[in-house]
Image: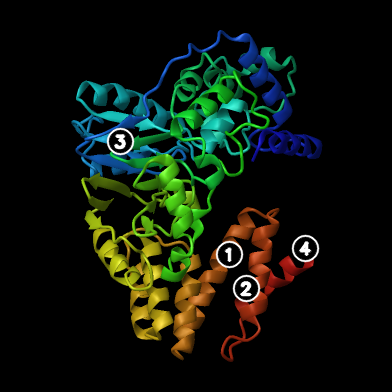
Amino acid sequence: MNLVQTLKRSERLAERGPHKNSPTLLPVLFVTALWCFTAQPIAAKEIPYEWNNVPRIVAIGDIHGAYDNFVAVLKNAGLVDNKLRWTGGKTHLIQTGDVVDRGPDSRKCMDLLIKLQEQAERAGGQVHALIGNHEAMNVVGFLEYVSEAEFASYADSNSASRRERAFETRNNKHPLGYAEHRRAFGPKGRYGRWIRNHNAAVRINGVVFSHGDWSKELSALGIEKFNRRVRAELSAKASLKGGVTFHLKSPLQHRGLAEVPLERVRQEAHRKEVDHILAKLRASRMVVGHTVTEGVIEPRFGGKHISIDTGMLELYRGGHQVALEIEGDNLRAIHRLGKVPLPNYLDESTLSDYLVAVAAADPQNPQVYTQLAEQYRRRGDLSAARNTLEQLFLMPKPVPFQYHQELGDVYRQLGEAEKARDQYMAYIEGLNKVSDSTPDSRRRINLVTGFCLKHNLKLNGWECNRCSHSCLRTIGAQ
């Protein structure tokens, strides 16, 4: 969103009352703006954005405070040892932005990246931590996505008194750690200064890396000018209003190409657009995060576009530990148990084989199994779909309740009524637990009600009495 939209949204949030994580956004924006105009300006300097003849590149997508999974990815890629010291030699590691927000441990993730930047440079390598839209939002003070645990990580024994002095009231709703968080992201703060001196995009061996997708409009600027504009806007040397940082077609915000379906015809329809953008960027391909995939790295357009945000944070059907490796012309996905070569085209002809290979290298990735099952169902091979989904429930860690519905649907298509009923019951119980723990969530109430109305009255001839009380309760709440 652009700055005008951010301000308007902040006003709406302020009018309807405190947000659970960022109770009043207008003061945040005001305080941030005050810091920007009163602090000593950041010294202008040229920041390199291009490297060539790099022997190995490893790219990691959105982290969102998922520290343990981030560390696991680094170890799987051979970039750190058990003491989290750089072992990547001359490798260039690119983190494509969105280290912060949503998850609890973004501060630990940033501290590790700062340490690895220093160690990698001494070893002849590089760590490139790119600016994502969530880093930009934290810098300007838009904090709706900052988790309570993330604020708490900044708190200390003096936070309560510091908060009272900062806001001149004993009854303010800002969480403990809020004032320290804002100071840390200010121009002189550890993370604010770190982010403001980063690139939003880099080009390495002719490959462009950025947080989100490039558009025709913004690719016309070129990488160097775009980086300068973003740094200037986040450092208050240029206006955010009408700028590029929060422009809807900015590579910090845009999702266009990553949302093109994995179908050959649909991808071919965008080839001219992709070629035009790459020509403007003087690049052979682009690698982006921002748009969450179905748990796997997704190449498109003949390998000219690669989406690497597989969902590292557990919260969004994630918890995946995946990185992209580029060595010369070889592109591989690094998973928990091995590496999988990327097909140039990921479409109807290659998707199933790719998913089978990923499942072997990442057997605890439930989204791989559901995608495979969907492929089998499209072919009419319901037995293969059933066998694939049943493997989900043999995993050592619990599988989210949503997958019970998918297996139940396959059982139902196969005519295995009792098995389908058991899966539906497990799904309903999962929905009930969620709605009971968050009774004010309209979306979850609607999910419970919708499923009951669709399945509980008659499921292949059964009456579903176990959830009727929940349906009556939730229907009454509408």
The residue that mark 1 highlights is 431
Counting from the top left corner in percent of width and height, residue 163 is at 65, 18
Of marks 2 and 3, the one in the foreground: 3
Cβ–Cβ below 8 Å for labels 1 and 2?
A: yes
Nearest the eye: 136 or 51 = 51
Residue 62, visible in the rendered structure: no
Q: Is residue 439 above or below residue 283?
A: below
Q: CA distance from mark 3 to mark 4?
A: 50 Å
- Amino acid type of the residue tagged 3 in the rendering: Leu
Mark 1: few, some, or many residues within 10 Å (few <14, many ≥20)?
many
- Relative to residue 171, is residue 449 depicted above or below? below
Q: Earlier in the sequence, mark 3 or mark 4?
A: 3
Q: Residue at x 47, y 35 (%)?
A: 222
Looking at the rendered structure, which numbered label has been put on residue 451? 2
Would you identify the image quadrant in which residue 94 lies? top left
Residue 99 position within the rendered picture, expressed as x and y whole percent measured from the top left: 45, 36
Residue type marked 4: Ala
Frontmost residue, 274 versus 240: 274
User: Label 1 to label 2, Cα distance in Å?
Assistant: 9 Å
Question: In this figure, which residue is indicated by the disc labeled 4?
Answer: 477
- Check the picture and name the quadrant holding the C terminus: bottom right
Helix, strand or loop at disc 1? helix
Q: Which comes before the other along the chain, label 1 or label 2?
A: 1
How far apart marks 4 and 1 lie (CA) works out to: 16 Å
Q: Which mark sits nearer the N-terminus, 4 or 1?
A: 1
User: For the residue marked with disc 1, what is the amino acid?
Assistant: Leu
Local secondary structure at mark 2: helix
**Chain-order first, disc 1 or disc 3:** 3
Which tag is nearer the camera, tag 1 or tag 2?
2
Circle 3 residue = 93
